[in-house]
Image: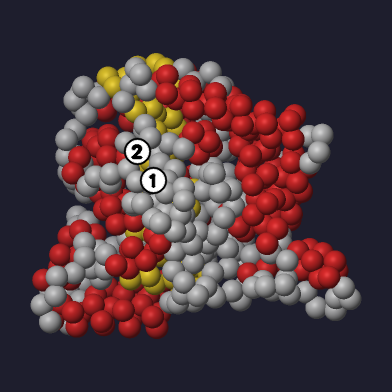
Amino acid sequence: MPTIADTARKVQSGEITSESLVQASLGRIEATKGLNAYISVLAESALEQARATDKRVAAGEKLGPLAGIPVAVKDNIVYSKGRTTCGSRILEKFESPYDATALARLVAAGAIPVGKTNMDEFAMGATSETSAFGAPKNPLDPGVIAGGSSGGSAVAVASGTVRVSLGSDTGGSIRQPAACCGIVGVKPTYGRVSRYGLVAYASSLDQIGAFSENVADSALLLNAISGWDAQDSTSSQAVVPDFTASLNKGVQGKVIGMPKECFGAGLQPEVRAHVLAALDKLEKAGAVIREVSLPSFEFAVPAYYVIATAEASANLSRYDGVRYTTRAQDVTDLFSLYAKTRSQGFGWEVKKRILLGTYVLSSGFYDAYYLQAQKVRRLLTDDFNQAFTGCDVVVTPTMPTLPPKVGEVFTDPMAMYLGDIYTVALNLAGLPGISQPVGQVGKLSVGLQFIGKAFAEEELFQVAAALEHSLNPSDASGVRPQSRRIGDEKAP
């Protein structure tokens, strides 16, 4: 089956047109609008860019590696051609005057944004149900969650409206929706991709990443968006390799570490069985499976929710009704403007996290909560560094259970937070991770997560591609056969 690299080559050769790809994507968006994957569709600008691409091809110009490829973009990544709402009423009408660096780099590589995708409000959630515009629906089973907070971006790929999309990951917000929807999701090393133009939730944890049907497409997308950016002081100047170069190297001699803390109590038996079966295939392909330990792992979730909410409290203080947000009416003074705007504009989950963050930063509680959480963060980083002395990558399930039913987590909020148990540690340590599907239980998908050393995404893609091939030996691309693909259209 073709990858987006194959499709881009067809566009470059004139075998198919960019306009036909975008038309097909827009048609699929319309046909699946009941899944609520998109907050806004950028039909006019997308078709305009597609026609410009086709004119450049006709003129003999050499285009980028993503020439003519339709992409979807999470609605907390700013784009000057349309709204950026962050899934919130407080930004319902906001239009950015500039483009996020990651998105600008995608466009420079030839990609064409066709829409902004649905998400948990300000990326705060693990189900996408806190969106002010209604939750996206899982194409595998609309009765279960699509995952969050980048649920719309995952649904956009899983339902075939695009082949690749951008999301953001603060504590699992790419990897969990990927697991729920049965696709690939990549969270890069902190600093690998510029955060300029990503609306901040927790600045020391947020990172832009990719969704795709297969590992190769995510690697190509990450090639396009990675690298240092003068606009982002936290972006790294580390050399960016070609992430696609390692895809066919296999896993002979690669050591995969299994943390003993991640395969015990709380892991659903069906999930464990599929993950272990996948590792058995890798072992037969030449990998070595070895037990490792992450002693501080059990403290990752509480530490994450202290640090993330503290940073959210600071970042969301800028939404006050004075500048670019929706403004409350019938206010009598500045205080009531602030209070009514924030009360009316923010949803309940965002309010809860702002209050919690303000509390842990307040006088008398900073040392007891925030400072302790930062110490745990240091311990987790040390644990990973120690684990990597004995292995090349670490493996865990992506989620401890199958995707829960819609609305279920709201009867037990702790269930939503504990669903992050395997994903938040990577954000705290700044490490890269990839989730990929390794089986199904009925209609529902099971995800496996590989964790790499800092700035070792190439090695991560190598192991993930080997597993993908082991699970789908007749299809080297790893594309799910049930998917609807944008890219097989013929030129008119």
Q: Where is residue 87 in the image (x, y as percent from the top left)?
A: 59, 64
Q: Which residue is drawn at 31% across and 79% down?
A: 49
Q: Position of residue 393 (x, y in %)?
A: 34, 28
Front position in the image: 361 or 329: 361
Is residue 476 among what the camera can see? yes
Up-down: is 444 above or below 103? above
Q: Position of residue 191 (x, y in %)?
A: 42, 46
Crowding near the residue tagged with mark 2, few <14, some 14–19, many ≥20 C-alpha atoms within 10 Å:
many
Residue 455, labelled with which disc? 2
Q: Which residue is drawn at 54% across and 27% down?
A: 378
* Secondary element at image label 2: loop
Front position in the image: 102 or 239: 239
Q: Distance between the residues labelled 2 and 1?
A: 9 Å
Q: Which colour scheme is used?
A: secondary structure
Q: In this view, does 285 lie to the left or right of 40?
A: left
Residue assigned mark 1: 236
Front position in the image: 368 or 129: 368
